[in-house]
């Protein structure tokens, strides 16, 4: 249950898979990363020309990875629907003709949307090299991205043993009691999936379940580990495409939140977003872990990686 003043929002089921697909399409940056862009559905096929249509594809420019996206409702069941459908799709994406379809979708989307071109500019990629960059990303195996309303034990077990890396995001729907037209959707914080597998977690050891659940590092963990201190100043430099380059300062507070321009945020990404929107950007997402730097010049992400490497 969620409460907003006199309103109560209760958890509800998605009316259809299409509703969930629409929510993903409208909010893909909160799942696949703030420097990602989304490609619509397209018919791809196996080597024997058996067709399949994933719900979409997402390309993360910053992380240089891409996702085959399939939004699912758990009521469609793991073994009867989800597993066989995604198996067919992963076979299809290795068909060269399918890769070409995805590449052309990406180029068309980039040409049509200046905001996507800006992502490449921010990443230091010249327009003449965009197709080459897309080719290099698509040459890698995709991550299977599954936004879903519920996660079952069978789904986790299948994800753990599936050949490809899988990210599972749980998206919840809440409707206002007495006013079903008023809807809230809950997304995970900081673009983090509920379940994230990789080649390192493809094992059957007793520790695999522990490895399967992503270790959630917060700013307070960096403080407790001694990498940063309460009161330390973080720096973020940002220049919007049609504006001046600005430097923002954030102060690390005792509870791990960041204070910027008189406002306090528990999430480094929302703290960074507040800054870049102050600079004139209309972006809705930004990765605060790679935006904020310490006085030593390290990003929060680099420090987080150091902590994780010692686990």
Image (cartoon, helix red, strand yellow):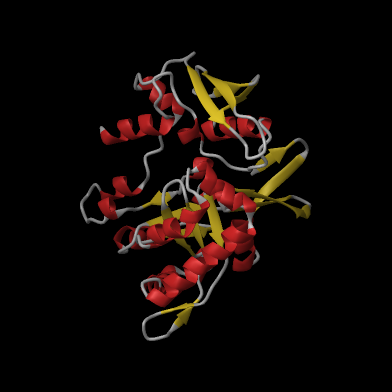
Q: Residue furthest left?
A: 205
Q: Which residue is at the front of the view, 233 or 19?
A: 233
* Residue 194: percent from left, percent from top: 45, 49
Side (left or right) of 297 relative to 11: left
Quadrant containing the C terminus is top left
Left or right: where 11 falls relative to 202: right
- Compared to residue 167, the image places residue 123 above or below, namely above
Tell me the quarter of the picture where residue 93 sits: bottom left
Q: How many marks?
A: 0
Position of residue 54 measured from the top left corner of the image (x, y, whole percent): 50, 70
- Residue 259 screen position, x and y as percent: 58, 21
Q: Is residue 159 left or right of residue 106?
A: left
Quarter where residue 45 is shown: bottom left
- Judge by depth and name the residue closer to the eye, 30 or 311: 30
Specify the quadrant that holds the N terminus. top right
Residue 139 pos. (x, y %)? 36, 62
Q: Nearer the viewer, residue 178 or 100?
A: 100
User: Can residue 44 be spotted in the picture?
Assistant: yes
The vertical placement of 91 against 56, above or below, is below
Question: Which residue is located at x 41 percent, y 24 percent?
Answer: 297
Quick one: 165 or 98, which is closer to the camera? 98
Residue drawn at point x = 59 percent, y = 33 percent: 239
As drawn, which residue projects farthest toward the front? 128
97 versus 78 height, above or below: below
Can I make out residue 13 in this image?
A: no
Residue located 30% across and 45% down the image: 210
């Amino acid at each position: 249950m969620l409460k907003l003043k006199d309103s109560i929002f209760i958890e509800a089921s998605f009316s259809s898979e299409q509703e969930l697909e629409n929510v993903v399409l409208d909010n893909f940056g909160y799942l696949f990363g703030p420097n990602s862009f989304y490609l619509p559905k397209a018919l791809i096929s196996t080597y024997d020309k058996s067709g399949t249509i994933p719900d979409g594809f997402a390309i993360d420019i910053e992380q240089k990875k891409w996702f085959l996206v399939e939004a699912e409702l758990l009521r469609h069941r793991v073994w009867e629907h989800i597993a066989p459908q995604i198996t067919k799709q992963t076979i299809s994406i290795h068909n060269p003709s399918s890769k070409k379809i995805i590449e052309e979708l990406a180029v068309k989307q980039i040409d049509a949307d200046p905001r996507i071109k800006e992502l490449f500019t921010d990443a230091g990629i010249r327009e003449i090299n965009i197709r080459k960059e897309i080719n290099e990303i698509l040459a890698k195996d995709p991550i299977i991205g599954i936004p879903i309303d519920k996660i079952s034990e069978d789904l986790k077990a299948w994800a753990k043993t599936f050949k490809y890396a899988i990210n599972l995001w749980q998206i919840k729907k809440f409707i206002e009691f007495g006013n079903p037209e008023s809807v809230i959707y809950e997304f995970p914080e900081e673009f983090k999936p509920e379940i994230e597998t990789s080649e390192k977690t493809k094992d059957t050891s007793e520790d695999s379940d522990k490895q399967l659940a992503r270790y959630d590092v917060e700013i307070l963990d960096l403080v407790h580990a001694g990498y940063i201190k309460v009161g330390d100043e973080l720096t973020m430099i940002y220049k919007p495409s049609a504006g001046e380059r600005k430097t923002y300062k954030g102060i690390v507070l005792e509870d791990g939140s960041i204070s910027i321009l008189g406002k306090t945020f528990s999430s480094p990404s929302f703290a960074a977003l507040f800054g870049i929107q102050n600079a004139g950007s209309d972006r809705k997402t930004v990765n605060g872990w790679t935006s904020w730097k310490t006085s030593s010049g390290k990003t929060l992400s680099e420090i987080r990686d150091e902590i994780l490497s010692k686990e």
